[in-house]
Amino acid sequence: VRISIKDFATELSVPSTEIIKKLMKRGTIATINQEIDYALAAELAEEYDIIVEPEEEKDVMEEVFGEVIDDEKDLEKRPPVVVVMGHVDHGKTSLLDAIRSTHVTSGEAGGITQHIGASSISLNGEKITFLDTPGHEAFTAMRMRGAQVTDIAILVVAADDGVMPQTIEAINHARAANVQIIVAMNKIDKPGANPDRVKQELSDQGLLVEDWGGDVICVPVSALKHQGIDNLLEMVLLVAEMGDLKANPRRKARGTIIEAQLDKGRGPVATVLVQSGTLQIGDPIVAGAAYGRVRAMVDSKGKSVKKAGPSMPVEILGLSEVPIGGDMFYVANSDKQARQVAERIKAQGRVQMIGQTPNKVSLDDLFTQIQEGKMKELNIIIKADVQGSVEAVRQSLEKLSNEEVRIRTIHGGVGTITESDVQLASASGAIIIGFNVRPEAATKAYADREEVDVRLYRVIYNAIDDIKAAMKGMLDPEF
Ligand code: GDP
């Protein structure tokens, strides 16, 4: 639950600058459009003797639209939704381009692909949906907002460069999201390509490829020369088949806003991914505080369409305002209902966090969370100055796992704590442990806003002691 400083100040009838000053005293530099979370808002409001209560937008949507419950017999196969991740310069963009340019259905407007944030391609009559923004940042940003849209991650690794820091990050982001990984071993056309070395490095990260006796599919490709692309896509379809991906196309549509912006001529435009049901022209929809009737729909090939079923990305026109990427959208029973829901959300003074927000975790309330049965696993991210320390901290902490709670390192790396670490922590309900590293002020402020618990240590034993102390309360009283 978040509110902008501006709106918050208006609610309290105090000048925004006063709130900003108060935040500054707490070590946070903020601007008036910046959002603060509920806990902080409550704390600040208390200084004015005002008690604020959170009104969950999620509850409005849940109350009005309920959960999707389908009969097995109504479920039909749906295309997989795929993201492309990997280290910078390993060929993510080139791979997406290669896939799109080789698989535009012939006969369509000169084969021009339009950038709408996601694209649908087909191979042997089967469809695959790609999220167009390469990298794990966009993917994790959506997860932070509760959106779970991806089924498969293609991990691009350059065969001449191997596993690099962002490769590891991508692996961990995908794992944290429980998304299947397929490796695209790219740049095999290059003289320096050394697939065996890369496979070794992947296995060091726990990804054992099939020809080494593991179960991770690894496809050699050259995005530049368009080699191996079909093979890669066939593997995507195979993994999708095994995942038995299904949805009910015959119900009112709902799904996720992939991206949205204000277009000068056309007004608010949003790319949406339908996840259940079928979206049709004329449907009254609501997404956060934005509502309206779907006036026009365009698919990723720039073609007007009247309907979009499960896993289909389409750009829609007709919303009252620009919705927020990562938010859910719903088809309402009527224009009136769509408007009313949007107005209720707006009245709450906020427009974010619709989906299922992962639990925020802090060592301070670890005990309570365990007691409430909310936590069986404590996810941690370890950043340290040298690899040896990452390993040492990780081993000592994971050893603390007991029957009630397992300590799991979802990401570890050398270097300072970055925004990407905070995003991963926020999306996965993890805490961050920094060993001989220190985040920049802006990253620290970001972590505070996201309510990510960041703990910094210089001595390993202190980290162990803290976690131990936090876990103490978890043990059953009789022990
Ligand atoms: P991204 O940062 O992961 O999106 O990487 P890009 O797609 O921008 O590619 C980075 C560079 O690698 C560009 O100069 C590409 O032309 C080059 N590249 C990408 N794929 C291949 C490939 O399969 N073979 C070769 N030789 N070069 C490639």
Image (cartoon, helix red, strand yellow):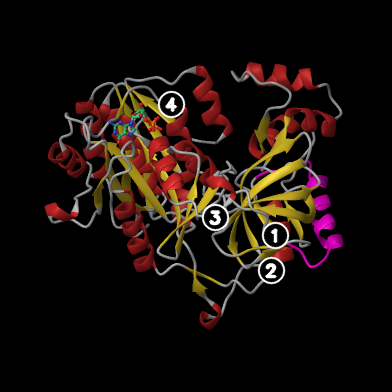
With 372 as the anchor, is 259 left or right in this view?
A: right
Q: Is the residue marked by circle 1 packed among few (<14), some (14-19), or many (20+) residues within 10 Å? A: many
Which residues fall within the magenta stretch? 330-352
Q: CA distance from mark 2 to mark 1?
A: 8 Å
Q: To which residue does mark 3 refer?
A: 107
Q: To which residue does mark 2 refer?
A: 252
**Mark closer to the observer (4, 3):** 3
Q: Is residue 47 above or below residue 69?
A: above
Task: Give the quarter the ligand 1 occupies.
Answer: top left
Residue 261 belongs to magenta span: no
**Mark closer to the observer (2, 4):** 2
**Mark closer to the observer (4, 1):** 1
Q: Secondary structure at mark 1?
A: strand
- Mark 2 vs 1: CB contact within 8 A: yes
Type of the residue with mark 1: Tyr
State whether label 4 is within 8 Å of ligand 1.
no
Q: Position of residue 214 (x, y in %)?
A: 17, 55
Q: Nearer the viewer, residue 307 or 381?
A: 307
Q: To which residue does mark 1 refer?
A: 330
- Mark 4 vs 1: CB contact within 8 A: no
- Look at the image and tell me in which quarter the N terminus lies: top right
Residue 306's image quarter?
bottom right
Q: To which residue does mark 4 refer?
A: 418
Q: Earlier in the sequence, mark 4 or mark 3?
A: 3
Residue placed at 40% from the left, 64% from the top? 124
**Mark closer to the observer (3, 1):** 3
Q: Position of residue 368 (x, y in %)?
A: 48, 50
